[in-house]
């Protein structure tokens, strides 16, 4: 397979300037790989939002071109409408995106414009609200929502289009830790269904562990495309774009230097650091997809939740868990300490679990016994 075949969106020599301003994008050539999780990094004003607005044709290049599925974008109304079904954008500020008076009206806006049958619009709205945890607030006036809830509505509106590519400009900015966890979990779930996820962020820790690949912009130019490790391996370039090394990158560097061990492979999470360092044999990972503790799961197993379905049960105490958020990472850490762990999993997230286990096996040589219960 050639690289071109594998890219869902690409730009060639893309230049853009706002009226009478300097170039906001200069000669940007890049490819967004299909089905991957991609993070854009770069200081404020680097051109990330401007680039994102080119991905669904809101802005039109002054020079160069944007391609979707191998074909150059066309800017007539019909072509743009078709493109926007496939490439949905969530703007940084939800207030730039929410116009309707209630949550459900706002989420229904996109699908209504597709002239879909009423039942399908209803189905899409219900699905998008469920995915973003907004079902109970569907009749709430949008004026009465918190910032985090408005952000969820904006994401739900994008998901109601059932896009192939979801582009989110700083999706976690201004949100509390739990909501950041929920949004990143949602991206994992959507990505598990084959959706390409593109985000911009200043959160280097998140980008390091989350992204399959990163693109870095500075002053309108693309200065790096590749793996997160590849980028953070270059302290000078990281510094040039006003970022810092991810905490786990630094911890690994310093700990390995103190032990006189190689920096490679680079752990991206605490469980991977443990996988690299711990000498004990891993515990077992029990995985279950229903809410109650099955027979056969040892009582001492530490439990974690991955996916929103069972979180409500955990909050009411029906389900006793140690990790209500970031449960996959919590459980993998326990397993690497030689303890048994129980992961309570939403159905759509199995692929992401397999991906993490595969990395532990291939990169860190740690095979974990998994029992599906
Ligand atoms: P980022 O998303 O990386 O912070 P932007 O794409 O928002 O960067 O901005 C890139 C450049 O374009 C900056 O110099 C910014 O000031 C300018 N810019 C962004 N939006 C507008 C606009 N609507 N009008 C004029 N200039 C703009």
Image (spheres, helix red, strand yellow):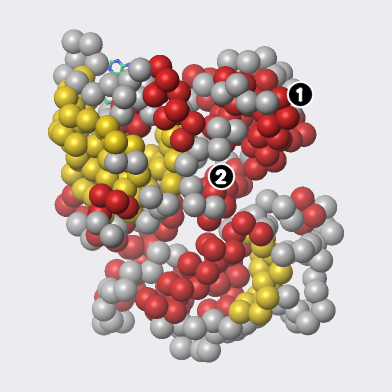
Q: From the viewer's perspective, is 58 left or right of 325?
A: left
Q: Which quadrant, please, contains the C terminus? A: bottom right
Q: Position of residue 356 (x, y in %)?
A: 48, 68
Ligand 1 found in image quarter: top left
Q: Residue visible at 68% across and 39% down? A: 127
Q: Nearer the viewer, residue 183 or 260?
A: 183
Q: Which quadrant, please, contains the N terminus? A: bottom left
Q: Residue visible at 82% across and 57% down? A: 317
Crowdedness of circle 2 by 10 Å Cα count: few (<14), some, many (20+)?
some
Return the residue at label 2: 183
Element type where label 2 sits in the image? helix
Q: Is residue 140 visible?
A: yes
Q: Nearer the viewer, residue 273 or 113?
A: 113
Q: Is residue 364 above or below residue 145?
A: below
Q: Position of residue 314 (x, y in %)?
A: 77, 56
Which quadrant of the figure has residue 282?
Answer: bottom right
Which quadrant of the figure has residue 242?
Answer: top left
Q: Is residue 41 visible?
A: no
Return the residue at label 1: 139
Look at the numbered discs 1 and 2 and tell me whether their residues touch, using CB distance below 8 Å. Answer: no
């Amino acid at each position: 397979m050639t690289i071109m075949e594998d890219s869902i969106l690409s730009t060639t020599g893309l230049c853009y300037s706002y009226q009478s301003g300097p170039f906001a994008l200069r000669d940007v050539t890049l490819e967004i790989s299909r089905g991957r999780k991609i993070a854009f990094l770069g200081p404020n004003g680097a051109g990330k939002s401007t680039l994102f607005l080119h991905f669904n044709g809101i802005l039109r290049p002054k020079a160069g071109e944007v391609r979707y599925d191998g074909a150059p974008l066309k800017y007539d109304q019909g072509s743009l409408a078709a493109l926007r079904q496939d490439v949905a954008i969530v703007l940084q500020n939800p207030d730039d995106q929410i116009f309707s008076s209630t949550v459900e009206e706002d989420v229904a806006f996109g699908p209504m414009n597709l002239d879909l049958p009423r039942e399908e619009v209803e189905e899409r709205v219900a699905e998008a609200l469920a995915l973003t945890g907004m079902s109970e607030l569907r009749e709430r006036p949008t004026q009465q929502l918190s910032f985090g809830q408005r952000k969820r509505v904006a994401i739900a509106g994008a998901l109601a289009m059932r896009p192939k590519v979801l582009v989110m400009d700083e999706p976690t900015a201004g949100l509390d830790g739990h909501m950041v966890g929920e949004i990143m979990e949602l991206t994992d779930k959507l990505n598990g269904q084959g959706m390409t996820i593109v985000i911009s962020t200043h959160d280097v820790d998140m980008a390091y562990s989350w992204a399959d690949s990163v693109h870095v912009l500075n002053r309108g130019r693309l200065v790096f495309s590749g793996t997160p490790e590849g980028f953070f391996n270059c302290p000078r370039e990281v510094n040039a774009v006003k970022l810092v090394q991810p905490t786990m990158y630094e911890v690994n560097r310093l700990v390995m230097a103190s032990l006189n061990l190689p920096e490679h492979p680079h752990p991206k999470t605490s469980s991977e650091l443990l996988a690299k360092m711990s000498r004990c044999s891993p515990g077992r990972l029990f995985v279950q997809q229903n809410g109650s503790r099955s027979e056969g799961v040892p009582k001492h197993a530490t439990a974690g939740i991955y996916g929103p379905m069972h979180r409500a049960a955990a909050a009411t105490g029906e389900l006793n868990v140690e990790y209500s958020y970031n449960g996959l990472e919590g459980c993998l850490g326990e397993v690497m300490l030689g303890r048994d762990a129980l992961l309570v999993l939403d159905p759509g997230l199995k692929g992401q679990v397999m991906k993490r286990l595969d990395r532990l096996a291939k990169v860190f040589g740690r095979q974990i016994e998994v029992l599906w219960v």
